[in-house]
Amino acid sequence: MSEQAAQVRQQLTEELHSYWQERYQAYQEGREVGRSLNLMAQRIQAADAQLPAAVEEAYRFYQENLVERDIGTVSLSHLPINGIPVYTIMASTDGDDGWLEVYDDVGECLGVGRTYLELVNWGDRDTLRNQVETGEYPPEMDRGQTLWAQD
């Protein structure tokens, strides 16, 4: 893995953890979170953008396998992470299952992650995408470690 990919993955992992920690704190206090996930702040419409082929293919995969089956959502953003312009594809089921794919401006994959609330497990693209169909999680991902399981 390149240093650039490692930096981007680390920043995204920290962002997800921070956001979900805020949501958990708000939940405990009976209030709403005052911000949305930063990764969603610069959303773009896939149909309106000229995307690298790998980004377009990733977005289409989740569109077909989650949105068109009416079991989830997918969003596409273009934003800087540590000064590196990246595309992020965030997909989630109607529950808490999720996937995150990150590409640089030319379509080089910087990481594919399986998410569950604030937890992220970075891994192999094909293995993690297969989990869209199976609903399984990577063996390394212990969902009992999420803040929400602490109640």
Image (cartoon, rainbow, N blue to C red):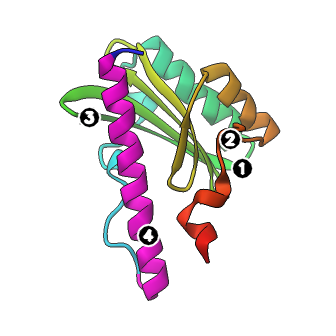
- Nearest to the eye among marks 3 and 1: give it: 3
Identify the residue under disc 4.
23
Viewer-side residue, 22 vs 61: 22
Q: Residue at x 32, y 40 (%)?
A: 11
Label 2 is placed on what type of residue? Answer: Leu
Q: Earlier in the sequence, mark 1 or mark 4?
A: 4
Gap between marks 1 and 4 measured at Cα: 23 Å
- Nearest to the eye among marks 4 and 2: give it: 4
Q: Which residues are magenta?
A: 3-31
Q: Residue at x 42, y 15 (%)?
A: 1
Viewer-side residue, 41 vs 142: 142
Q: Note whether residue 34 is visible.
A: yes
Viewer-side residue, 49 vs 34: 34
- Nearest to the eye among marks 1 and 4: give it: 4
Gap between marks 4 and 2 measured at Cα: 24 Å
For this view, does 139 lie left or right of residue 113? right
Residue 46 at what x, y percent from top left? Answer: 44, 30
Label 1 is placed on what type of residue? Answer: Ile
Gap between marks 4 and 3 measured at Cα: 22 Å
Identify the residue under disc 1.
71
Q: Residues within 10 Å of mark 2 (few under 14, many from 20)?
A: many
Say which mark, if any, is on residue 130. none
Label 3 is placed on what type of residue? Answer: Ile
- Against 150, residue 143 (above or below) is above
Q: Earlier in the sequence, mark 4 or mark 3?
A: 4
Residue 96 at what x, y percent from top left? Answer: 63, 56
